[in-house]
Amino acid sequence: MTAPERPGPERPGPERTSDGRYIIVGGRRWRAMDPELPDRLAEPLKSALGSARSRIRTAPDNAARETLRDRVQLAKEGLGERGTAWWELDRDARLARAEDRLRRLDDV
């Protein structure tokens, strides 16, 4: 079995709505990540999100699962996928939110 192809120059990312605010996956609409987040914020947030998601299913107990779900929530908020929609905030507020969530991930 081969790994799924990742978006790149030769393969575009998931389908998006015309306004760019949502991606379409499996016929469902999901809020897209804030496209203006700099890599210095987006990359560690995406890494924390992926790590927490992958560890949930092997967590030893409910407390550990809850902690990992908290990490997922913080990362998704930082990326603009949850909480106040990124397009409703100005750029400075979005960057401040991402920086705050990245700091808070260190505490969880």
Image (cartoon, rainbow, N blue to C red):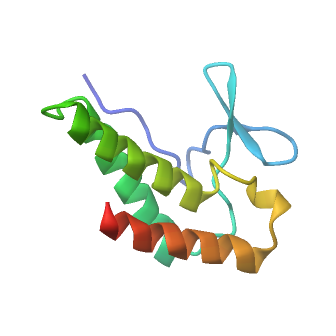
Instruction: Name the residue at 44% across, 62% down.
Output: 45
Q: Quadrant of residue 86?
A: bottom right
Q: Is 46 placed above or below 7 here?
A: below
Say above or below: 76 vs 93.
above
Residue reaching furthest left? 60
Q: Position of residue 32 (x, y in %)?
A: 67, 47
For the C terminus, which image quadrant? bottom left
Q: Report the number of numbered marks.
A: 0
Q: Position of residue 73 (x, y in %)?
A: 48, 48
- Up the image or down, 104 lies above or below 68; here it is below
Q: Quadrant of the N terminus?
A: top left
Q: Residue at x 52, y 73 (%)?
A: 100
- Residue furthest front in the image: 63
The answer to whether residue 98 is seen in the rendering is yes
- Residue 11 lies in what quarter of the image? top right
Q: Quadrant of residue 69?
A: top left
Instruction: In this rendered view, identify the residue nearer to me: 79 or 83.
Output: 83
Depicted 64 relative to depicted 90: above or below: above
Q: Position of residue 46 (x, y in %)?
A: 44, 57
Residue 39 shows in the view: no
Q: From the viewer's perspective, is 78 left or right of 66?
A: right
Q: Is residue 47 left or right of residue 92?
A: left
Tell me where residue 50 appears, x and y as whole percent.
36, 47
In-front residue for pair 54/66: 66
User: What residue appears at the point 43 percent right and 38 percent down from the top-left corner?
Assistant: 5
